[in-house]
Amino acid sequence: SPARTSAALQAVTSLFDAMASAEAAAAAGADVPPSRGVLTGGRQRGAPSTRIRELGSAVEDAWARVAAGKINVDVEADRIATDALDGTAYVANGHTELAKLPSDERCRLLGAFRTNTRITILELSNTGVDNAAARVLADALGARGNASLTHLNIERNSIGSEGILALADMLPHNHALRELKLAYQLVTISSHAETRLADQLEHNRTLLKLTLEVRQVRARELRDKWLMRNAQLRRQQLRALGAGAGAGDDGDGDGSVECRAQDGL
């Protein structure tokens, strides 16, 4: 974890400081008592200066990586909202700092995607996304919201029925998403939420992949029906454009339907 990493780096930094002090004392002619060599396993009077500098540099780099893992929510939200990110993918799968944010701060960060026009892929698997965050994402992707995001992965989170209902009601108003990954949530989703998701999918003609374990037979049948219809519509669009089946189809050109389940942080 970042906390354990920081503690370890602090210990290593203190060790290198002591070694550097011992070398400085030796260079000044002081009598430095022999110590067990940390670097070589042998007995030595201090450590080679080159090696100390190399390892000291490595520690500084490690500290920089730890700092980079921390999130300044206000700064990051502003970068997202104003298209100040490089690249078109925002990948944060398993990001522990994002998962540890208070719910309101996580919501503030994700709400910034409403005005983003650059990111097309958003990966948020296992990042603490809950019902509140799912509602924020649904609002960001709904009417007059984000129109550039084509792939959203929020699997392995804590989205329950309330969050699924919000995402379901977003579908008729979104015309950009091709893939929505919702599988493996840590909480149970009601039959009502499963059915609403399948019913609302009828009014969305762009989604090609939806990953979610659906227990209700009717909901599964409807989900498969509307995803297959969308795949057929996609093939027709490609043929009309003269691109041929599969061209520019984000890997879905064969019309297959999946019904399961870097500038990131």
Image (cartoon, rainbow, N blue to C red):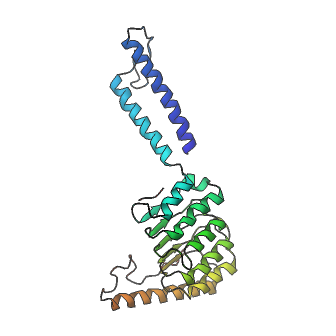
Residue 93: tell me if it is visible: no
Relative image position of residue 244 (x, y in whole percent): 31, 87
Observer-nearest of 180 and 44: 180
The quadrant of the picture occupied by the N terminus is top right
Relative image position of residue 129 (x, y in whole percent): 60, 63
Please determine whether, in this image, residue 100 is positioned above or below residue 65.
Answer: below
Q: Is residue 235 left or right of residue 101?
A: left
Q: Which image quadrant is residue 108 in?
A: bottom right
Q: Which image quadrant is residue 219 in?
A: bottom right
Please determine whether, in this image, residue 149 is positioned above or below residue 67.
Answer: below
Please count the marks in the image: 0
Q: Is residue 44 left or right of residue 69?
A: left
Observer-nearest of 198 and 111: 111
Please determine whether, in this image, residue 141 is positioned above or below residue 264.
Answer: below
Observer-nearest of 84 and 36: 84
Q: Which image quadrant is residue 261 in?
A: bottom right
Relative image position of residue 120 (x, y in whole percent): 44, 70
Relative image position of residue 206 (x, y in whole percent): 48, 83
Could you tell me which residue is drawn at 48 percent across and 68 percent down? 116
Residue 107: tell me if it is visible: yes
Could you tell me which residue is drawn at 44 percent across and 67 percent down? 119
Could you tell me which residue is drawn at 62 percent across and 80 percent down? 169
